[in-house]
Amino acid sequence: DSGVTQTPKHLITATGQRVTLRCSPRSGDLSVYWYQQSLDQGLQFLIQYYNGEERAKGNILERFSAQQFPDLHSELNLSSLELGDSALYFCASSVGSGDSPLHFGNGTRLTVT
Amino acid sequence: QKEVEQDPGPLSVPEGAIVSLNCTYSNSAFQYFMWYRQYSRKGPELLMYTYSSGNKEDGRFTAQVDKSSKYISLFIRDSQPSDSATYLCATLEYGNKLVFGAGTILRVKS
């Protein structure tokens, strides 16, 4: 068990809808990262927060947004969902920002129908 | 050219074999190197973390980094069926994002 908790484990929704994925980092970790994993794309970095502030941005669509709250948990919001958004969404956390290994949760499997 | 290249496999070996998994990277600024193991429908699990050239051993696993040739390896001794998973290499430039290889599927046959 990595100590990173993600909810929900599974999510099935329709195109055009909006969903929120939640992540609680390991105790003591200040950084939270979001990754998307699909069969043909591998692990794609979306965004990183460090102690409540956005630190780095990857290939995150404008329809997606995230935030990290004062208690350090994070939420990833996906809106105007399309079929192609179906994927595994992983949250990871690390102690620092930029030199610490990442510890991953078990992901949220999103299916858009 | 991808920043981190990794042969996707699948790699199939008999139980007890020594497994060698490899990655190459292009950015000489990468300073930290990791290997993750991912079972189906689970999150990647950190196996090894190193930031220097040379070998690092942990049980049956040895990570090797050669910065001069930009080559990283993971060796698994006495492989077991429970080692069957996807193995991902990852590299990190200080202050930057973690870059993953595509992952190698390993199958250990009993």
Image: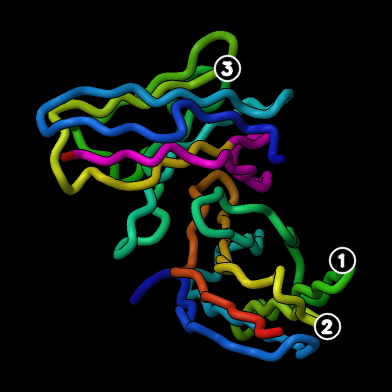
* In this picture, residue A85 sits left or right of residue B100: left
Instruction: State the extent of the magenta-drawn residues as a range.
Output: A93-112
Q: Secondary structure at mark 3?
A: loop
Task: Examine the rendered structure and indicate whether residue B31 appears above or below residue A69.
Answer: below
- The x, y position of residue B1, in whole percent, is 33, 77
The label number, if any, that marks residue A72 in the structure image = 3
Q: Under tag 2, what secondary structure?
A: loop
Q: Give the mark toward the camera: 2 or 3.
A: 2
Parent chain of label 2: B
Q: Is A3 situated above or below A53?
A: below
Answer whether residue A56 is visible to the viewer in this image: no
Q: Image point 37% across, 26% down: which residue?
A: A76
Identified at 62% across, 45% down, the residue is A102
Outermost residue, top side: A70
Labels 2, 1: front one: 2
Q: Which mark is residue B78?
A: 2
Q: Are marks 2 and 1 in contact (CB under 8 Å)?
A: no
The amino acid at mark 2 is Asp
Tell me whether marks 1 and 3 sit on the same chain.
no
Q: Amino acid at mark 1?
A: Asp
Q: Which residue position holds label 1?
A: B58
